[in-house]
Amino acid sequence: MSFFNYLWNEIIGFFGVNQFIEILQKQDYSLLLTYDGIVALILPIIPLLLFLEVFLGFIYKKPQTKVYKVIFLIYLFNRVLGRFIAIGMVALCIGALQPFAIIKTSMTWYWFIYGYIIWEFAHFIYHFLAHKVRLFWCLHATHHSPEEMNLSVSHAHFFLEAPYADFIRTSICILMGLDPIMLFTIMFIDGTYGAFIHVGENLIKDARFGFLNKIMLTPSHHRVHHARNPLYLDTNYCNLLNIWDRIFGTYQEENPDLDIDYGITRPINSGNFIHVYFGEIIHLTRDVINAPGILNKLRYVFYPPGWSHESGYQTAKMIRESYLEEEDASF
């Protein structure tokens, strides 16, 4: 394959138009009414919105070039790694765990509602652990490092985060009886919406979406999740349905009077690829090496980010609780 053919395939792959082009070549437009046809129409939406967002950033003189530069490098790095490392975690979990499912479901509307609620629970567990266990935070912190919010942030991931997330989410869903076809359908819906909720202020200023803000997770909620304001730390782990955040007490609405400060609490050069991609792993390695005793070394790995064997440390939970206590005392 020539370089230009490779580049062309990468471009149309990024924009998600492969399937749409195939349908156009077949000239059988009835295929657009099938599941594959609907997927072909939906896939290009997020990439096109991303480019619109970039364009509007220059129009509004808020280009966010530092964020786009680093995330572009992350995207390229992950694409190169992906040519050598392919971990089919979803297929492995389905094959290994489906015989142990507690119930059996099918593609009906009522089982689909059940399936989506279970999927959101599985996503909540993966996401909660990614913030509460430092080893998993090392896989997730890359996603939280950008200090601006825009659709490109959905591409900011450490390459091992996807297998970790797929293992947790797929294992729970399959054991709870989700049919694999239903699971893949939910994953497509949730993946598309999960990318959309990273939409930035350049494209949608007020992302609370009116009454929908009360019954689902909107981009406004996810902006809160990506914030390092004390009020917002470690909240809104769900993706579409807010049921599990409400049940477990991690639900937080955006305060329109509080400017969102994006990024992680540890000082970082968010314009440096190494700092963004490997920074947390480097810091964890240093802490483990310098920690006295095997128990402290293990605590650094499995305790929440911010924990230290020395006094005076602050985890995200401690920072938020202290902030809320001060707010209560001021009234």
Image: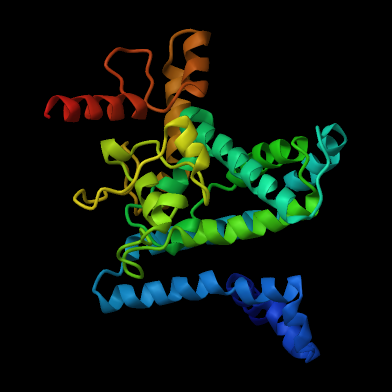
| Residue 233 in the image: above or below residue 82 | above
Q: Position of residue 29 (x, y in %)?
A: 75, 88
| Residue 206 in the image: above or below residue 119 | below
| Residue 213 in the image: above or below residue 201 | above
| Residue 224 in the image: above or below residue 126 | below
Q: How is the image coloured?
A: rainbow
Q: Tell me which residue sits at (36%, 70%) in the image.
A: 203
Given the current orientation, which residue lies at the most extreme bottom position? 27
Q: Position of residue 155 (x, y in %)?
A: 51, 58
Instruction: Assign the N terminus to one quadrant of the image.
Output: bottom right
Given the current orientation, which residue lies at the most extreme left position? 330
- Is residue 88 or residue 184 the one in the foreground? 184
Residue 268 lies in quadrant: top left
Q: Is residue 200 left or right of residue 71?
A: left
Q: Position of residue 36 (x, y in %)?
A: 75, 72
Residue 188 lies in quadrant: bottom right
- Is residue 45 or residue 266 the one in the foreground? 45
Q: Is residue 225 left or right of residue 13?
A: left
- Can residue 288 be seen here? The reply is yes
Residue 60 lies in quadrant: bottom left
Q: Position of residue 86 (x, y in %)?
A: 72, 51
Instruction: Assign the C terminus to one quadrant of the image.
Output: top left
> How many numbered marks, from 0 up?
0
- Can residue 281 be seen here? The reply is no
Q: Tell me which residue sits at (76%, 75%) in the image.
A: 34
